[in-house]
Image (cartoon, helix red, strand yellow):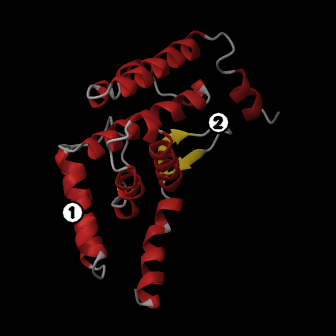
Amino acid sequence: MDVRKFIEIMAVTEKLKNTTRHSWTSSGRHESVAEHSWRLSLMAYLVKDEFPEADIDKVILMCIFHDLGEAITGDIPAFNKTKSDETVEDDEVRQLLSGLPEPYKKELSMLFLEMHSQKTLESRIYKALDKMEALIQHNEADISTWIPLEYELNLTYGEKEVEFSKYMKELREALKNDTIKKIQSPEKSVRHHHRAAGG
């Protein structure tokens, strides 16, 4: 790839470092889209023993690229995202990919089609992990950062996406149990309020 093109692509993707998500980290700041994508990629690598028949390298690529459109559109939380928002994001991805040289343009265009169709094992693994990463992050964040609807959402989010796999269902159940413990914990907001008060 031409070095100028390479640097130009890096400038676009750097926006994913600056674009924050709705989720908060355990240290009390918003996470970036890039951080979410990085950990999602790590999750894919670490479940490869559970899916020996899957092409985990392809799943990792899906995880790296799945939120590419948010470099342009910004992040819209799942509970606010509409079909129209998804169309805009898809259009932005197509625009970004059209500017890539081959073989990258074709490879990534095919990858996005596969992610959207949700017909392959690899695309289902990526989609389920995408939902699970968000749940893990919410459970790691201080509960005072949650908005009211997340108390219910964290108990149901991603249920449909994990149905294809016994392992994913087990992971979803474990995260649900973690959420219940977090909600019931009497010290759920102490750390955040202490920090907010300058402690």
Left or right of 189 in this view: 94: left
The residue that label 2 is drawn on is 26
The residue that label 1 is drawn on is 110
Q: Nearer the viewer, mark 2 or mark 1?
A: 1
Q: Position of residue 164 (x, y in %)?
A: 26, 29
Left or right of 120 in this view: 1: right
Q: Position of residue 123 (x, y in %)?
A: 27, 46
Residue 141 falls in which quadrant of the image? top right
Residue 149 tag number: none
* Residue plotted at (29% across, 46% down): 122
SS of the residue under disc 2: loop
Point out the residue furthest to the front here: 52
Q: Position of residue 165 (x, y in %)?
A: 31, 27
Three-letter amino acid code at the position of disc 1? Met
Q: Position of residue 62 (x, y in %)?
A: 35, 54
* Residue plotted at (51% across, 47% down): 42
Mark toward the start of the polypeptide (2 vs 1): 2
Choose between 193 and 70: the one closer to the eye.
Answer: 70
Q: Is label 2 in contact with label 1 (beta carbons under 8 Å)? A: no
